[in-house]
Image: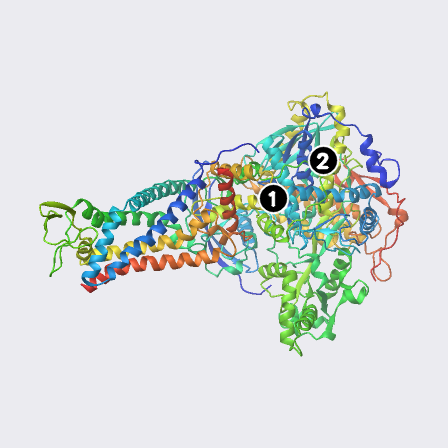
């Protein structure tokens, strides 16, 4: 047997990256969900906590790095997936006239490309909806309300200052940005039933994507073992149901609660 | 023609070693200039191709299947014998030799069989080194089981798929050489003639089965490892494509054909279900360890069972005839294959058959007593007091499932009946042919440079083969015998140079092949190839099958010869000769079977004795057992082709037994 | 051996003259098929009828007809080897069908398995993958070490056997939506990876065999698990995971 260099060019290597980025994105989902669950906290304190969280997420340097890794993972996962899908199609140029794939595999395992595309569209719209508006638009700010003072980044109150264009001016001195009100953006968005439905559908797509993807990632990396694989498999199902469900409950809750 | 078996001088146990020490060798540089053709890629052909290529020869391998891995050796279930004595139960080379000679009913060559036993241990070493996953015990060492009526455990196995694992081992060894370019593999190619130049085998004519192209291939020697000819019976446990063509064409070019009538009919196969059937399925012999064979005692019961009016389980114990236990009290259901098969035929011929096929052929193989026996044991082990019959049965079924689960499942799949609840139905079927091309001690046929190995040759098994010995012989020939002996011949060819294919000999051989193909394709008859093959099969089964009579054999010879004439007049081969055409392939094979069948019957007629797989009604003891006639028939019948099967000339190679005493086999 | 009445069936069979020509589905009617017949015997009967009518019979691969040689290869009613699990086409019996059924019979579909004729495909790609490393480099000689010199854990030996039972039929490729040969390739890699004899060449073996499979045009593995379900020998996905592991280890070391 001769020397061979299989790395980089092999389908298998693409699958490793797919699995690696996919499993990383699962971790991201957990983090993201943990943050979003704060939206369930009612009233002003909820709004306050969520916005503080939003500020933290957009300014903390470590989070910043992680967010770039996440963007990269999403893009890489999508491009890699596209390349693999093209190879998939190429391997069977002529289709069967009659096929019953449902007898040997689950639907989502065969439609990861479609599900992935739906999710990608969802992510773009989602980013545009919140991230873009928040970052590049003119987002609302949390201001004094019923005796509560405007707030600084760290949430402490500023006394006697005025707010101009999102900056707190105290005694003629700029004290920095006031906290943008992502909470309100979210709340307002989720008053639109179409947007709520869109988010719920997005989560369903993610759920199906995860039903296959979670355990598939382990398989691709060769992490399989008679003892642990059944656990991974159950965990994967639980993850695929619970995480998107909790995500999806947020817009529904906000729609109903308001 | 004088048949020289070339058995080396000296004591039996030193013959092979001495022979190896004295034969000519070819030096490694010269091997690169020598080409060898191997036809067939089963255990014998695959192992020979790989080993010859390892030695440095240029090998061209041919198989009709789409891959060498599909040769029918793959279907062997039980195991492979080897005199390793790992179990410490007194096995030895001599014992394996003796058992094989005796099992073959004293109709094989002592020297060949001893060599087979001698190299058997190396086969296991070699296969393990190749990564063949034999069964092991908990200590990590190789496991053995006992098989086919011998007194030691010497059978190595890989569940019920030993043939598959051994073949894949040989295939892997071939792959290594194919990758190196030392073997050139010709898949989907069928050898249609051997080319003889100056009296030596120098090549073959082969048809590319995909394009229909007729190709010339030359070599310094040709090895036939093309298997047996059981498909002359149409229904057999052989693969659908298994055929005699390569061997038969060689026969017609001068290779004498030995003992064609020695056929092994395996007792435990699933019975024929009807006229649409294409193939018979073997159920491992191991089932007879626990199954009891019986038929109803009363003819009316048998009839009622066939008509579906009576169930086997409803027949009372006293109304059952456990005929093997009755006739052979000491061996009972474990008598050798040939004896068990004939006994089943005897009962069915007498009208006691239980299967509603066209011929009522079938007997019960009943596990009920074994289930209850094991069930009671299990209940005892588990400490269950006063278990109910139902509990016992459940426990027993579990034991049987552990032992034979996959076989029971296979049976259910084919018959749609549950053998845990109702007895299996079985009947003998053609399984293996001991006869084949005559070879000398070096495995060379009567054509110089033409060799035959494995089931294709006649050596080693005499008139009856023991279980788990076919795999042993195929691999012994290919790995450890032929690669040595062929060098002795090829040593004279080191200056010959490449054999050209543009010679009159190749022209003539190719023309003959093309003419025959054209004749078949252009015949425009009215009957399909299968029509003739089925007819031939029926004649063979009824008159040249498990028991043979003078009258029947004479009729068979006549009928086969008439059928052959009809075939050439009326066969219809659709399609053309220049693409994939399975009907054309079959037609060529059946044409050869129609000739072989006649020689087969002639051989059976000439052999006026009963031995092993050959049973003549006229030659039996008062109890109906086989009567061997050593004084007159202790020889190999070797037939020389002279133009027609009916005109073949019989040559006799006398068998000398210097190391064993000829005895009558008794299983009573 | 039931006495059930014969089946009347409509067959939709892919007919294609050769690799280059265009094929299409042809419809045939067949009557009075015994439920005890095997699926291939049913095709034999169809072919005999076609021959008797002067038509060209349907070509299909088959040989041992007992589920071990791996020759038979039909995609029957949307599944490789038809309905029923753990069986090859030759082990499929007509009792699995009902009177009046329509049965689609197609060849394996994969870029790496070009059609030879009708239902026959060229699976030599599988052979070439084996040439790339499906062996242990040991010459034949009478003096390799004794077979019992190296004890092998029974569980490993049994696992190796399970991987080695692959019959190379190609149902995994046929079932896979990507026509991936991962199950086939990984079964061979696993057999040797599990045995001490296979360790010496393990790294090159996995790299070369995987590379060859991709060169042949088999698709990537999507872990749908269809191959495992359709494999007549029940080869486990465990093998694919092992291959992935071995390949990863071999490529980074």
Dot placed on the residue nearer the N-terminal end, 1 or 2: 1
Q: Secondary structure at mark 2?
A: helix
> Where in the figure is residue A8, as x and y percent of width and height?
43, 36
Residue C110 visible in this rendered orientation of the protein: yes
Tell me if C202 is positioned left or right of B661 in this view. left
Which image quarter is the C terminus of chain B in? bottom right
Tell me if B449 is positioned left or right of C102 in this view. right
Residue B599 visible in this rendered orientation of the protein: no
Q: CA distance from mark 1 to mark 2?
A: 23 Å
> Where in the figure is residue B158, as x and y percent of width and height?
66, 51
Mark 1 vs mark 2: give the one in front: 1
Q: Which residue is mark 1?
A: B70
* Foreground residue among A128 and B608: A128
Q: Which residue is mark 2?
A: B250
Mark 1, chain letter? B
Asked which quadrant contains residue B350, the reply is bottom right
* Foreground residue among B484 and B203: B484
> Where in the figure is residue A136, as x and y percent of width and height?
18, 44
- The figure's colour scheme reads rainbow
Mark 2, chain letter? B
């Amino acid at each position: 047997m001769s020397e061979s260099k299989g790395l980089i060019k092999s389908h298998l290597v693409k699958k490793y990256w797919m699995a690696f980025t996919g499993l990383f994105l699962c971790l991201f989902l957990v983090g993201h969900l943990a943050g979003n669950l704060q939206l369930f906290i009612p009233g002003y304190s909820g709004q306050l906590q969520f916005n503080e969280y939003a500020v933290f997420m957009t300014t903390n340097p470590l989070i910043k790095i992680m967010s770039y890794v996440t963007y990269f993972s999403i893009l890489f996962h999508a491009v890699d997936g596209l390349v693999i899908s093209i190879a998939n199609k190429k391997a069977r140029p002529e289709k069967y006239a009659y096929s019953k794939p449902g007898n040997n595999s689950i639907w989502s395992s065969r439609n990861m490309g479609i599900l992935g595309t739906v999710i990608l569209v969802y992510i773009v719209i989602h980013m545009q909806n919140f991230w873009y508006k928040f970052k590049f638009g003119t987002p609302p700010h949390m201001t004094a309300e019923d005796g509560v003072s405007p707030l600084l980044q760290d949430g402490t109150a500023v006394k006697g200052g005025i707010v101009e264009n999102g900056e707190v001016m105290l005694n003629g001195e700029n004290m920095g940005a006031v906290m943008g009100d992502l909470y309100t953006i979210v709340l307002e968005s989720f008053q639109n039933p179409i947007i709520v439905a869109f988010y719920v559908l997005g989560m369903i797509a993610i759920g199906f994507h995860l039903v296959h993807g979670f355990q598939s990632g382990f398989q691709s990396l060769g992490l399989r073992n008679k003892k642990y694989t059944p656990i991974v498999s159950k965990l994967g199902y639980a993850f695929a149901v619970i995480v998107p469900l909790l995500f999806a409950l947020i817009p529904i809750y906000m729609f109903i609660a308001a | 023609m004088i048949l020289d078996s070339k058995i080396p001088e000296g004591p039996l146990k030193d013959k092979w070693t001495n022979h190896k020490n004295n034969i000519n060798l070819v030096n490694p540089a010269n091997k690169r200039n020598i080409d060898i053709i191997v036809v067939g890629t089963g255990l014998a052909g695959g192992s020979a191709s790989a080993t010859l290529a390892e030695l440095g020869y240029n090998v061209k391998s041919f198989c009709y299947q789409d891959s060498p891995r599909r040769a029918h050796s793959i279907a062997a279930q039980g195991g492979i014998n080897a005199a390793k004595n790992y179990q410490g139960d007194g096995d030895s080379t001599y014992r394996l030799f003796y058992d094989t000679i005796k099992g073959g009913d004293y109709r094989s060559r002592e020297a060949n069989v001893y060599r087979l036993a001698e190299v058997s241990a190396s086969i296991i070493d070699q296969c393990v080194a190749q990564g063949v996953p034999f069964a092991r015990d908990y200590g990590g060492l190789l496991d053995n089981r006992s098989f086919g009526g011998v007194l030691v455990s010497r059978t190595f196995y890989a569940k019920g798929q030993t043939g598959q694992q051994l073949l894949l081992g040989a295939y892997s060894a071939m792959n290594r050489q194919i990758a190196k370019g030392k073997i050139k593999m010709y898949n989907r190619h069928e050898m249609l003639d051997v080319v003889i130049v100056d009296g030596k085998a120098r090549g073959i004519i082969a048809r590319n089965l995909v394009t229909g192209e007729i190709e010339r291939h030359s070599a310094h020697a040709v090895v036939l490892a093309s298997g047996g000819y059981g498909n002359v019976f149409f229904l057999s446990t052989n693969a659908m494509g298994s055929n005699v063509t390569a061997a038969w064409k060689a026969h017609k070019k001068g290779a004498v054909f030995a003992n064609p009538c020695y056929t092994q009919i395996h007792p435990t196969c699933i019975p024929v279900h009807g006229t649409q059937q294409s193939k018979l399925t073997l159920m491992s012999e191991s089932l007879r360890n626990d199954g009891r064979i019986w038929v109803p005692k009363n003819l009316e019961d048998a009839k009622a069972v066939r008509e579906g009016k009576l169930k086997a389980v409803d027949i009372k114990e006293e109304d059952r005839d456990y005929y093997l236990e009755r006739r052979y009290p000491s061996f009972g259901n474990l008598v050798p294959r040939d004896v068990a098969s004939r006994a089943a035929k005897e009962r069915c011929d007498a009208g006691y058959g239980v299967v509603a096929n066209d011929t009522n052929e079938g007997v019960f193989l009943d596990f009920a007593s074994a289930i209850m026996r094991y069930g009671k044991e299990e209940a005892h082990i588990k400490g269950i007091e006063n278990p109910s019959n139902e509990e016992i049965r459940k426990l027993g079924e579990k034991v049987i499932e552990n032992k034979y689960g996959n076989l029971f499942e296979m049976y259910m799949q084919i018959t749609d009946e549950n053998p845990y609840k109702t007895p299996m139905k079985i009947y003998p079927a053609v399984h293996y042919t001991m006869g084949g091309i005559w070879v000398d001690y070096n495995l060379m046929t009567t054509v110089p440079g033409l060799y035959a190995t494995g089931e294709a040759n006649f050596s080693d098994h005499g008139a009856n083969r023991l279980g788990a010995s076919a795999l042993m012989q195929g691999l012994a020939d290919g790995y450890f015998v032929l690669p040595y002996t062929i060098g002795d011949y090829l040593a004279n060819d080191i200056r010959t140079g490449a054999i050209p294919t543009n010679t009159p000999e190749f022209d003539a051989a190719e023309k003959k092949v093309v003419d025959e193909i054209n004749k078949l394709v252009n015949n425009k008859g009215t009957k399909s190839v299968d029509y003739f093959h089925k007819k031939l099969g029926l004649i063979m089964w009824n008159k040249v099958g498990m028991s043979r009579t003078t009258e029947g054999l004479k009729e068979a010879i006549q009928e086969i010869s008439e059928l052959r004439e009809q075939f050439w007049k009326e066969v219809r081969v659709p399609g053309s000769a220049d693409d994939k055409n399975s009907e054309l392939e079959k037609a060529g094979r059946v044409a050869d079977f129609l000739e072989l069948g006649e020689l087969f019957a002639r051989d059976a007629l000439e052999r006026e004795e009963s031995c092993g797989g050959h049973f003549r009604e006229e030659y039996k003891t008062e109890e109906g057992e086989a009567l061997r006639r050593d004084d007159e028939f202790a020889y190999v019948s070797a037939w020389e082709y002279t133009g027609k099967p009916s005109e073949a000339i019989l040559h006799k190679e006398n068998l000398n037994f210097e190391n064993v005493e000829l005895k009558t086999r008794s299983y009573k | 051996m039931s006495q059930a009445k014969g089946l009347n069936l409509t067959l939709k069979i892919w007919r294609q003259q050769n690799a280059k020509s265009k094929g299409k589905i042809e419809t045939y009617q067949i009557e009075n098929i015994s439920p005890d017949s095997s699926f291939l015997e049913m095709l034999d009967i169809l072919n005999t009828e076609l021959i008797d009518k002067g038509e060209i019979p349907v070509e299909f691969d088959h040989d041992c007809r007992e589920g071990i040689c791996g020759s038979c290869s039909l995609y029957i009613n949307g599944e490789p080897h038809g309905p029923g699990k753990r069986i090859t086409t030759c082990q499929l019996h007509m009792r699995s069908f009902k009177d009046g059924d329509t049965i689609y019979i197609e060849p394996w579909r994969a870029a790496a398995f070009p059609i030879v004729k009708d239902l026959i495909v060229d699976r030599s790609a599988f052979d070439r993958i084996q040439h790339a490393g499906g062996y242990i480099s040991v010459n034949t000689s009478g003096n390799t070490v004794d077979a019992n010199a190296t004890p092998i854990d029974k569980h490993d030996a049994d696992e190796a056997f399970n991987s080695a039972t692959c019959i190379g039929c190609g149902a995994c490729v046929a079932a896979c939506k990507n026509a991936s040969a991962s199950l086939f390739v990984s079964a061979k890699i696993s057999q040797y990876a599990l045995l001490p004899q296979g360790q010496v060449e393990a790294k090159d073996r996995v790299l070369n065999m995987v590379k060859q499979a991709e060169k042949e045009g088999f698709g990537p593995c999507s872990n749908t698990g269809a191959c495992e379900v359709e494999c007549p020998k029940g080869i486990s996905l465990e093998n694919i995971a092992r291959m992935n592991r071995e390949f990863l280890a071999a490529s980074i070391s």
